[in-house]
Every structure is written in structure tokens, then in C-alpha cells.
Amino acid sequence: MYPILKTATQAIILGCSTSPFDRPVRLLERLIDPTIGYLGALELGAAYEFGLHTHIDPGNARRWYQRYILMNIDGADPEWEKARARIAQFHRASRNRTSSSVPVASSAKKMASPLFEHELSRIKNLKNGRVEELVEAIEDFVDSADRNRQDVILAGQALRHIAEDGHPEAMHVFALGILERRFAPWNRSAGSIRAQAQHYLMKAAAKMYVPSLLKLAELCEGSTVSTAETAIAFYRVASREGAQVAEGNLRRLHAKYPDADSRWIDQATQYIKSGKLPLCP
């Protein structure tokens, strides 16, 4: 794949004649690695922004830049400077400059990508500010993917990174994606998927994130007294956090299981707060 990436990129940068005209762009669009994702995302963003071996398409360019940024969502400034240098090679202004003048022009932003800078600034600001809005932006990205499986995987990887940083909303959304089999391989067993989802929900619940508390209570409800007792503990914590819907569920479960063990419920409540409650089967 890498030789194809290099050859197609050079053909676009140098303006080589190809048949058909958009062949380099089509080759880059097919370069997808199961782990990395879209290998030519940055190059395709530049090609569509500047109209190289394809027509100018700002919307398509922006989406390719989004893919690159999401693939490198934990990137630091050196990573983004490398990206800017790569984009500069595609800029038409680079065609009329000597190799010695390119760095000067690049540092003066004369060969910058307005679309890339806009998307990078937007995502960095969200990540450094209201993370829930970044989670929403990633959900919007995957919702507009027309069921593009690779975009769904990419969104899941980005959400997982944010979740691992300890953000409860990201944990919750990522867990729901796992339960819906969007962010997990299709061949995973139902039990494994359920356990992985509960792992992230439990971490969010330990931070008193109400949607995760309610979802775990729902998952733990079952036909046995033991799972109902655990569900009661989740609803109890959610109720104390202001979730009115939890109060009705508490009354329902207490009526259904009048012999529920209050000692376990009390202990489970403490386990929830410490993030040490065993997963429901």
C-alpha cells in the first residue's frame, strides 16, 4: 500500500498526466488499513481542496481532513506541523518556488490550507474545552457516514481515546456503540461485547454519570433476585443524583422483589461509587 500511496501522491503533486485523469485520487481513496484507517486522508483532503486530479470539492476535502484529524486525535503540535508541511506540497503556490523559498513561504502561511486549519482548530478547541461537544461532533461525523464501515470504526477509535482519558460522556457513547455492535468486530461473542460495554459504563457510573447508571440498571434487570438487587442499587444512586425516572423503577422492583437483600443493595451501592461492582451476566 505504501508504494501506491507514494506514487499516487507524487502524480498529484507533480501534475502528471494520467488516464483516467482522476486515477491517483481513486487509488488513494482505496488505501484503507484495518488498523490505521485511511492512509491517504491528508493527501485526499488537499487534492479536493485545491482541485488536483479532481474537481474542487470543499465538503469532501473537509471530510478527508476530519478523518486525518480523528485518526491522530491525540496528536501534538509536531504532528500537525508535519501535516501542514505535507499539505504545502500540494499547494499551487509551491509549483513556482525554489526549494529554498518553500520553507519561508510555508512559515508565512502562504501555502496553508484554510479548510484543514479550520477543522483542526475546531476539534482542538472542543477537546480542550467542552468534551461533550467533541463527542457530539464525532457522533455527527459517523451519523453522516452513510453506514461507511471504516468511518464508523474510525469514530469508535476516536471515542475510545477520549474515554480512556476519563471523560464519562465519551465512555457512555462508546459503550452504547459497543452494545449496538458498531464499534466492535462483528465476530465478537455477545457475552464479550456486553462485558466490554459494561466496563466503560461502570467507569462512567463511578463518576456519577446518570445515563450510565440508568443503562447499567437496565442491563442488570433480569428474572433473578440477584440481578434485580444490583439494578436496585444502580437506580438508588441515579435517584440520589436527581434522576426522577429512577424512583418509579425503584418502586417497581421493590414491589416485584419484596425479599431483596437490603445488605447487598447497600454494599453494591458503595461498590458503584468506587467502580468495583462486578459486571452483570
Image (cartoon, rainbow, N blue to C red):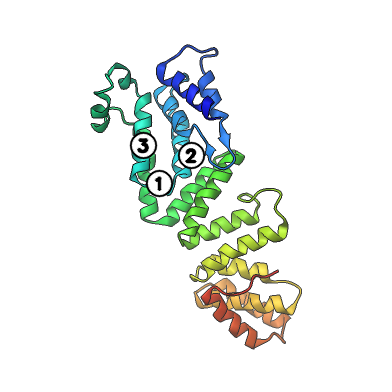
Which residue is rendered at x = 41% and y = 27% of the image? 49
Whether residue 26 sits left or right of residue 78 in the image: it is right
Q: Quadrant of the C terminus?
A: bottom right
Query: Residue 100 at what x, y percent from top left?
Result: 25, 23
Label 2: how many Cα within 10 Å (few below 14, some 14–19, many 20+): many
The reply to whether the C-beta atoms of the residues labelled 3 and 1 are less than 8 Å apart is no
Residue 2 location (% of width, % of height): 52, 30
List x then y, in percent, for residue 29: 54, 29
Mark toward the viewer: 3 or 2: 3
Q: Secondary structure under badge 2? A: helix
Give above or below for 232 relative to 116.
below
Residue 136, x across and y down, in percent: 48, 51
Q: Identify the residue shown where x is 38% and y is 36%.
A: 83
Residue type beneath disc 1: Gly
Quarter residue 224 falls in = bottom right
Instruction: Give the answer, above or below, for where 11 lies relative to 42.
Output: above
> Residue type at mark 3?
Lys
State the residue at coordinates (62%, 60%). 196
Mark 3 crowd level (few <14, some 14–19, many ≥20, 10 Å Cα) = few
Is residue 98 in view?
yes
* Pointer 3 or 1: first along the chain: 1
Residue nearest the observer in this picture, 178 or 161? 161
Instruction: Identify the residue position indicated by label 3 in the image.
Output: 82
